[in-house]
Amino acid sequence: MAGNSFGQAFRITTAGESHGPGNVVIIDGVPPGLPLTVDDLMVDLNRRRPGQSSIVTQRDESDTPEILSGVFEGRTTGTSLAILIRNQDQRSKDYSDIKDKYRPGHADYSFDAKYGFRDYRGGGRSSARETTVRVAAGVVAKRLIAEAFGGRVVGYVTQVGSIRATISDPAAVTLEQVEKLPNGEPNIVRCPDATVAARMVELIESMRKQGDSIGGVGEIVATGIPAGLGEPVFDKIKADLAKALFSLPAVLGVEYGIGFGCATLRGSENNDVFTATASGDKPRISTTSNRHGGMLGGITSGMPIVLRAAVKPTSSLPMEQSTVTSSGEPTTIRTKGRHDPCLLPRFVPMAEAMVAIVIADHWLRWLSQGGRLK
Ligand SMILES: Cc1cc2nc3c(=O)[nH]c(=O)nc-3n(C[C@H](O)[C@H](O)[C@H](O)COP(=O)(O)O)c2cc1C
C-alpha cells in the first residue's frame, strides 16, 4: 500500500530520508552462496557518491554501507539481506528558510497536500539520498545476473541540454569507457564519447556559475540477457523497467529501443528481421537490428535491452525564483544547500541498479515457473 517495496521474487524495501540518520534496504529473494562484501557494494556507491567531482553536489558523504544481515563469511545466506548507509553531512539549517515555501519543481507542495506536513530538510523521503541503498541493492542484482547467465548492465549519459552523443552500438559501450577518458582521467560526466563529454562538462560548469541547472538523457543497456524473461500482460518486463526508472527522482520520460521514433516509421521500416545461426542442437535466433530494444510482447528477445530516461534539470536553484508560502502568500525563494547542477552523472548508477533489479526479479520469477537457462 505505502509503496516502499519493489519487485516480487527479488524484492527490495527501503526506508530513510535525506536528513535523518540514514537509509536502509531489505532485499528478499537473494539466493544463498552469492559472494558479497562491503567493497563490492562500494564500487557503485562511489559512482553515485556526492562530492565525486566538480560537477556534482559537494555534500560530503562517504556512503560506506553496513551489511546488517544476510551475509556470512563473504557469501549471502539466502535470508533477508539488510544494508544500512548512514547520513553524515546533513546541513539542515540550509533548509530553514524554505520551511514554509514551496520550491518550484520539487515535491514540497505535493507532500504537504498528501501528508499535511513534511520534513522540509533536504526533501525528506523525496530526496535522491534514498537511492543510495537502491544502488547497493543493484550491486547484489548485478552480481546475481552475472553469475546466473553472464548478464551485464551499463549506463551512460547521451545528452546534456542540447549537446548529444551518438552511440552507434550501445551494447559495445564498456564500464571502462563510461568511467575513464582515453587519457586515463575520470570521465566525470559519464558520456562515453570523450569529445562530447568535454563539451557537456563545460555546459554543466557554466550552469553552476549561473546558479542554474540543466537536464539530459541517460541510456542504460543490458547485455547477455537470455530470451524468455518477462510476463505477457501486466508485468511485462518493459512495464516493470518503466516503473523502475520512473520511480527514480526527476525522471520525466522513459523509452526503449527506437522509442518515440517508431511513430514516423512504416512497419516495413520498423520490423527487426529475424535470423538464425547454428548453435548445438538448437538454432540461435536473433534479429539483424534492434529497434525493438530487446523486448517483444513484454518478454526478452535475447537482444540487448536498450532504455533511455529523460532527467529534468535540478529544481533547487541558488537563483531567485517566484513561489508562494504554504499559506498562499506570494514570495521568492533561493535554495541554499548543495545541489547538482546536472543530475545525469549521478543518475547513471541509480538507473543501472533499477534495471538490474528488474532483470534479477524476472529471472527468479522465471525459475520459479520451472524456466531453465539455455
Ligand atoms: C542523482 C539525483 C540527485 C538529485 N539531487 C537533487 C538536488 O540536489 N536538489 C534537488 O532539488 N533535486 C534533486 N534531485 C531531484 C529531486 O529529488 C526530484 O526532482 C524531486 O524529488 C521531485 O520529484 P520529481 O522530479 O520526480 O517530480 C535529484 C535527483 C537525482 C536523480
Image: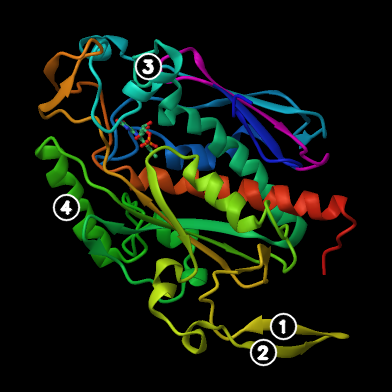
Kindly identify which residue carries mark 4: 202
Residue at the spot x=59%, y=53% of the render?
239
Residue under numbered circle 2: 275
> Would you name the residue on which mark 3 appears?
112
Looking at the figure, which quarter contains the N terminus?
Answer: top right
Q: Earlier in the sequence, mark 1 or mark 2?
A: 2
| In contact (CB < 8 Å): disc 4 and disc 3 | no
Front of the two marks 1 and 4 = 1
Q: Is residue 37 left or right of residue 46?
A: right
User: Mark 1 is on which residue type?
Assistant: Ile
Query: Nearer the N terminus, badge 3 or badge 1?
Result: 3
**Between discs 4 and 3, the one toward the N terminus:** 3
Q: Amino acid at mark 4?
A: Glu
List x then y, in percent, for residue 358: 64, 49
Inspect the magenta stretch and tell me whether residue 165 lies in it.
Answer: no
Task: Locate residue 326, reporting x and y percent.
Answer: 26, 13
Q: Circle 3 sits in a helix, a strand or a loop, which is it?
A: helix
The amino acid type found where label 2 is placed reads Thr
Q: Is residue 130 above or below residue 93?
A: below
How far from the left and from the top, in percent, is residue 67? 66, 25
Q: As rendered, which of 241 and 218 lies closer to the eye?
A: 241
**SS class of the residue under badge 1?**
strand
Residue 369 in the image: above or below residue 3: below
Query: Which residue is drawn at the image coordinates 11% and 30% (left, top)?
Result: 319
| The disc label shown at residue 285, or none | 1
Q: Nearer the viewer, mark 3 or mark 1?
A: 3
Relative height, residue 150 to residue 318 (above, below): below
Q: Mark 4 vs ligand 1: CB under 8 Å?
A: no
